[in-house]
Image (cartoon, helix red, strand yellow):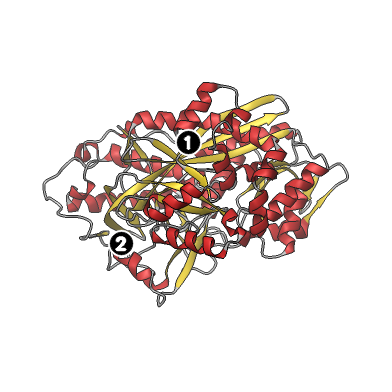
Amino acid sequence: MGAGCSSSSSSLSLSLRLPNHKNSFSSTLNQLKSPSNSIFPIFHSSRTLYSHTYNSFPNFSMNSPPKCTTNSTNIQEIKHTQQNPMSDPHSIDSQLLQKLVHDALVWSSLHGLVVGDRNVERSGLVPGVGMVHAPIALLPNSFPETHWNQACELAPIFNELVDRVSLDGQFLQDTLSRTKKVDVFTSRLLDMHSRMLQIGKKEDIRLGLHRSDYMLDEKTDLLLQIELNTISCSFSGLSCLVSELHRSLLYQYEKSLGLDSQKVPINASASKFAEVLAKAWTEFNNPSAVVLVVVQPGERNMYDQHWLSATLKEKHNVTSIRKTLAEIDAQGKMLSDGTLLVDGETVAVIYFRAGYAPTDYPSESEWKARLLMEESAAIKCPSISYHLTGTKKVQQELAKPNVLERFLENQDDIAKLRACFAGLWSLDDSDAVKNAIDKPGAYVMKPQREGGGNNIYGDDVKDSLLRLQKEGSEEEAAYILMQRIFPTAFPTILVREGICYKEHAISELGIFSAYLRNKEKVISNEQCGYLMRTKVSSSNEGGVAAGFAVLDSLYLT
């Protein structure tokens, strides 16, 4: 669920691909658009697919100083005098910059800020094989403390909203009824939800690990929501490490940079998510049961997930197991009392890091596994109703007048939610469609899909709307229109594959949150850390794992 997508007025695309080391990020983006370039996945995230050009890996040795490239098309001139590194990190002295990059790479390697390397065949299968540092911003991104506080304050309100909406089965079915006719994936999810309603399946213990994503609109200075993710919220494991890395660098180089490491908020996303998973496990009340982490095969973002599993075990003595949907179908069964067994283990909590996209269900085997889990007594994170609550169409419906009042009573909370909603419209709104055809750059078309690479921007919005009008089909029900958010572009330094790049970029703030309720008792409803993603300002999409962005942190101002 969420609002608008994002980019700056200069045709911002949030798609940041791994560049050739001889070129800047932006110039390589243009190369990647050519059909002659072969694109291969580097690792699968729980939200999106990270890609790069196969031959683009730079040759980098820790024995030689890190290389930096400058995008001359974006940067008018870099002065040699040292300026405030937060206002212009491009002005950092070259020798100091090399030291910062070197130390950042060493820190990342020593502290597990890593992902799988697509160049190594087994990197998504065998832990410890073929690791490379995660793509990062070298220094944190300035962010107003007032908007940071606003985003944190919204987290428990959105948690409550998700829970309330998920309980209204008729609302979910009605809202997605037209989408169901034209979207096979949404149709299968709705059929599963309908079955749960028919058999009277109740989830006494309700668990949600969410992430609400925002951008700060330059023109209005408003914090606007992009989407609220209710399934497979990635990077809770790695995002906290980036915050630690930045605090370490600012502390170590305080005299040179003149920055206060304490202005980078402490990020406890991994420990907080693990804590709430452990609380849910405790509510299940079976000390021998495990947490089942549902993963994609060949998961190259496994270390982000392993951080949660390791924290669960080390801090809470809770064991977790990792299985793909196909493995769950082959190894899983449900006892007469609803107990779910997978590979002989009793499952207390199911934590989905897969299952959010059609590609996760290549056969009926995966759908059977999803239904088996949904029908079981195990605690689902998320349940099918929570999953559907996070769809784009439900988000658009909730933005309509008087709809929030159906689920929430507190008028102050309702006002706070509405203040962060971007413009959202159905494609049966003729005025909105006409405006989008006239001014396509002000809108984004979004399908009912999670992950990156699915949205429609610019003139493609106009072409797609005109095509749908001409065909007169119901395919329009598969999309919604969103206001395009235009954040401020800023100079930054991005690091991939040991090479740093001086670029202009935009950022997206994600606030992690957790909700746990057992019948009428709310056990947890809290903000749980954050994810800052920074992307070159000349791209449209936003996923780190999709190769569209780097991991970043905040510097409160």
Q: Which amino acid does label 2 sit on?
A: Ser
- For marks 2 and 1, give the one nearer the viewer: 2
**What is the three-letter code of the residue carrying label 1?**
Gly
Lower position in the chain sequence, tag 2 or tag 1: 2
* Residue bearing mark 2: 26
Q: In this view, does 482 lie above or below 250?
A: below
**Residues at marks 2 and 1, CA–CA distance in whole angstroms:** 31 Å
Numbered label attached to residue 529 = 1
Residue 185 lies in what quarter of the image?
A: bottom right
Residue 359 — which label? none
Between residue 419 and residue 63, name the one nearer to us. 419
Look at the image and tell me in which quarter the C terminus lies.
top left
**Residue 343 appears in which quarter of the rendering?**
bottom right
How would you rate the neighbour count of disc 1 (Cα within 10 Å): few for under 14, some for 14-19, many for 20 or more?
many
Tell me if residue 37 comes above or below residue 496 in the rendering. below
Residue lying at 23% horizontally and 46% vertically, measured from the top left: 89
* Number of numbered discs: 2
Q: In the rendered view, tell whether residue 411 sits above or below residue 273.
A: above
Residue 111, position as x, y percentages in the image: 43, 47
Instruction: Give percent across and percent down for residue 147.
Output: 38, 32
Which residue occupies the foreground of this view, 47 or 358?
358
296 horizontally vs 499: left or right: right
Relative horizontal placement of residue 340, taking residue 380 as reference (left or right)? right
Residue at 56% across / 65% down in the picture? 471
Q: Can residue 236 be seen in this view?
A: yes
- What residue lies at 48% left-to-right and 54% top-to-bottom? 445
